[in-house]
Image (cartoon, grey):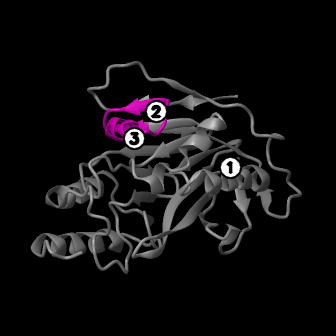
Amino acid sequence: MALAALGLLQAACTAAPSRLRGGPAPGGAPPTNSPDVVAAGNGLAAEKFHGAVRLRADLTVRPIAPGVFLHESTRALPGLGPIGSNGLVVLGSRHALLVDTAWGDEATAALLDWVERETGRRATDLVVTHSHDDRIGGIREARRRGIRVHEFEGTARRASADGWPPPDEVFASEALLAVDDVRAEVFFPGAAHSPDNVVVWLPGPRILFGSCMIRSGDATDVGNRADASLSTWEASLAAVEARFPGPTTVVPGHGSPGGIELIARTRQVVREAVSNPRMP
């Protein structure tokens, strides 16, 4: 079944828009007698999951809107202990869009297996929001399954330099993805957490996935500064606010989702980091 077109919106990108293609989900649409999925009038499923579902010791999923799941994978980092990393699974009528992989190939395999088994969809497309391994660490598993990978050109360059497989689609600064009846806008607002961080906007449920350029509501610092651009972070936040005003839900790269207060909190910790560059 052909998916809808992917349009590259950035004016400087002169290549003709490519088309996404994906095969039918295994077994077709989810069975209406499933205890977890019932047919909805708009072609999506109305998930009956309540709270987090633990797939492995280091991986959970939970619904945050109809047809949208937050996946969180955890890894213990030296000196920091266990750190959770967020991504999204967005269900179309027959296929699914993955926003960032889980943290490693094994966790990503478990996540993709769960999507197929419990929702009747097959993930056909993956957006990587930047080149750090908590975003891209499962890309080899995604490629092994034939999932189409979309990356900002800066991410593609940095990922290639780090030895990650190349994407299928590269965009100059923004892209519109269509997977069945799901639309997702991908936007590079400027350097912040990293030189290549993009955000993903789901206009239907008005969900903004800020990845690691957006901090959680209880964050006390900007997090990993290794590739950060403190001098442009605020301007990048302003670009996101101008482009996607009034999100219902804002999802940070780490920590709990919230509302627009997460953007304000991020701005605050960035200003504190700029005024006190010796902060960790």
Residue in front for this viewpoint, 236 or 159 = 159
How far is mark 2 from mark 1, CA to CA? 35 Å
Span colored in magenta: 151-174
CA neighbours of label 1 inside 10 A, class few (<14), some (14 to 19), many (20+): few
**Residue behind mark 1:** 42
Q: Which residue lies furthest to the front in this view?
A: 78
Instruction: Find disc 3 in the rendering and name its residue.
Output: 159
Point 52% across, 37% down: residue = 149
First in sequence, mark 3 or 1: give its number.
1
**Separation of marks 2 and 3 at Cα, in angstroms:** 8 Å
Based on the picture, tell me whether residue 165 belongs to the magenta stretch: yes
* SS at mark 1 in the image: loop
On the image, numbered disc 2 is attached to which residue? Answer: 166
* Amino acid type assigned to the residue bearing label 3 in the image: Ala
Tell me where residue 230 sits by quadrant: bottom left
Alpha-carbon neighbours of circle 2 within 10 Å: few (<14), some, or many (≥20)?
Answer: some
Front residue of this view, candidates 135 and 70: 135
In the displayed structure, 105 sits above or below 256; it is above
Image quadrant of residue 61?
Answer: bottom right
**Residue situated furthest right in the rendering:** 33
